[in-house]
Amino acid sequence: MSSVNPSAPFSAEFDPNSQEFSLAGVVRPRSADEIATSLSTLKEAIEEVRGVLYINVKRLIQMNNTAFHAFVRVVLDACRARSDLRFVIITSSVVGWTTRMFAHLNKLEPQITVEVYDSKFYPGQNFVENTSFIPILRTQTKMTWRHERAILPRHGMRPGIVMADICCGIGDFAVLVQKEFQPARIVALDHSKASLAYARDVAAGFGITDIEYTYGDASEMLLEDNQFDLVTCRHSLQIFNRPDVLLGELYRICKPGGRVYITNEKNSHCLGEPRSQSIQWTYNEVAKLFSHFEMDVELGPKSRRYLVDAGFEDIIVETFMVTNLDGDPRDFADVIMAWEDVYAGEMAVKRGDSAEFIQRFRQGFQDHIFAALHPKGYAGWPIWVASGRKPL
Amino acid sequence: MHVAEKEPEADFEPLLQLEMEMGTFLSDWHHCDQLSTFVARMISHNRTDPVRHSNFFSSALNELLEVLFRGGSPDGQIGCAVYRQGPTERVKLTFPCPPRQRHFLNEAVAKARRGDALARYLDSISADLAPTRDAVLLDLAINFDALIHLEDSAPSSITLVVDLPLEGIVT
């Protein structure tokens, strides 16, 4: 065996502005001496802060008992020496053992509390992880797959590759990819346990056993560096408040020479005839509504800039328009109906919009459905597809 | 007494088995990390959430390997076998064990099985500067819901058997 340690690098950092000491990566020392510098950083942080010291272990992938005892020793000693100081340890719901191990500290010292980082993952999380979003995801994938199955090979999809579908939702895209392209391995990650449960049921129903569905935080994944030939992330950068952070994670897990494939929308460009003005007004308002919740559903054309800034090369950008002429126009109408339910029925209400606004807002969706189902009508939903290659 | 006769893994499906010279194993501390990561990945791929199961399993197996590393002598072989029954993985670590060490190991396993294991575990966190063998086995019992026992192996060897019901914890 090689003597090189292949595990994720370990880091211990203190941010005095947020009074947060962060541990990340894999730390399995043989003795506490090997992490003396990190222990000193913690001691210095304790000396410097007032009130509360946050200890962030969300990105701590592995920590052996040697390291755990050493760090805990410093914290427990500080509790006994400084009754004015509180410690808040932030663990991740993804890395289960950290929550179990650190939770005991509160039994030893009431000055220590442990919080599991989960519910405030990103501002729009409650909307997109609600089970009411499942019908949207299912009908959307049905509509977009007709286009993407032809587009994907231009962006690195081919049989036998190792791929990850990040923010996989209900996993239907992964199932379609598995059936159409037969990659050697698919890891499909999402932060919604309800969606993952649905995904596993769907896969089981199709007799598909080789998709690895995993619960995780897309902006801080347990997946290791440089392991996938293709990383797909569809309709998701646009609903993160920090798309650059998410893209950085996609870059990290992509192999050098592999590609990251993203799809996003520009909602204000949804269109329809007849009743185009009402439709246009509503979709302009959709963009504003998402912006209120720190989501950018106008991100599509910005994909190239994001990919360039993240360090990708050989960037390919293309667009396609899902329309009422793709198959059954009722499918298109179903998508719009699902949007109306969530955007007007939940998000606008949550924003505190007036009944008059919501009525006009709903009318645009209804007019879009009218255009889709009209025998001479045309209704469209544009999607921006982009991918970039991670440099060798 | 918690040393049982070696019994066949009647209801457990064998998943993986490897052997290594103790001298080779003890030549590099990183072998604990490398072996635990490799074995965890191999046996977790068909669990409900392979990535998180692998992370959890690696954490437990690494602790066991570190215990062996710290107390090991360079003679003989280390054997690591993993079995599965429903939501539980059974890890069997077989290694050379002189009588004196066997006694201490038996004591540590007994402590991890007792009703006051949590109190002992909290004491170890609170008081010990570095984790002892007892503390590691208590950690597995408390944080990984592990059931631990010992089996007699070949002369001068012993097998540490650890049942880890991680599938239920992870999902």
Image (tube, rainbow, N blue to C red):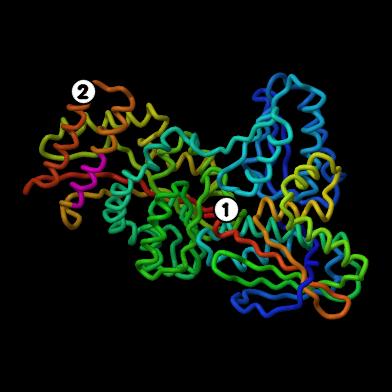
Quarter-of-image position of residue A117: top right
Q: Where is B45 relative to A50, above or below? A: below
Q: In the depicted view, which residue is nearer to us: A305 or A234?
A: A234
Q: In the depicted view, which residue is nearer to us: A289 or A201?
A: A201
B58 to the left or right of B19: left
Quarter-of-image position of residue A92: top right
x and y, in percent, of residue A310 in the image:
54, 42
- Please provide the residue range marked out in magenta: A331-339
Cα separation, mark 2 vs mark 1, equals: 46 Å
The subunit carrying tag 2 is A
Question: Farthest residue in the left direction?
Answer: A375
Residue at horizontal 87 percent and vertical 67 percent from the top: B102
Q: Quadrant of the C terminus of chain A?
A: bottom right
x and y, in percent, of residue A336 in the image:
22, 43
Q: Which residue is mark 1?
A: A253
Q: In the depicted view, which residue is nearer to us: B42 or A77?
A: A77
Residue at horizontal 73 percent and vertical 75 percent from the top: B18
Q: Is residue A333 magenta?
A: yes
Q: Which residue is mark 2?
A: A355
Q: Where is B145 relative to B83, above or below? A: above
Do residues under tags 2 and 1 come within 8 Å of each other at their CB atoms? no
**Label 2 element class:** helix
Q: In the depicted view, which residue is nearer to us: A243 or B162?
A: B162
**What amino acid type should be assigned to the residue bearing mark 2?**
Ala
x and y, in percent, of residue B35 in the image:
73, 65
State which tag comes first along the sequence, 2 or 1: 1
Q: Quadrant of the N terminus of chain A?
A: bottom right
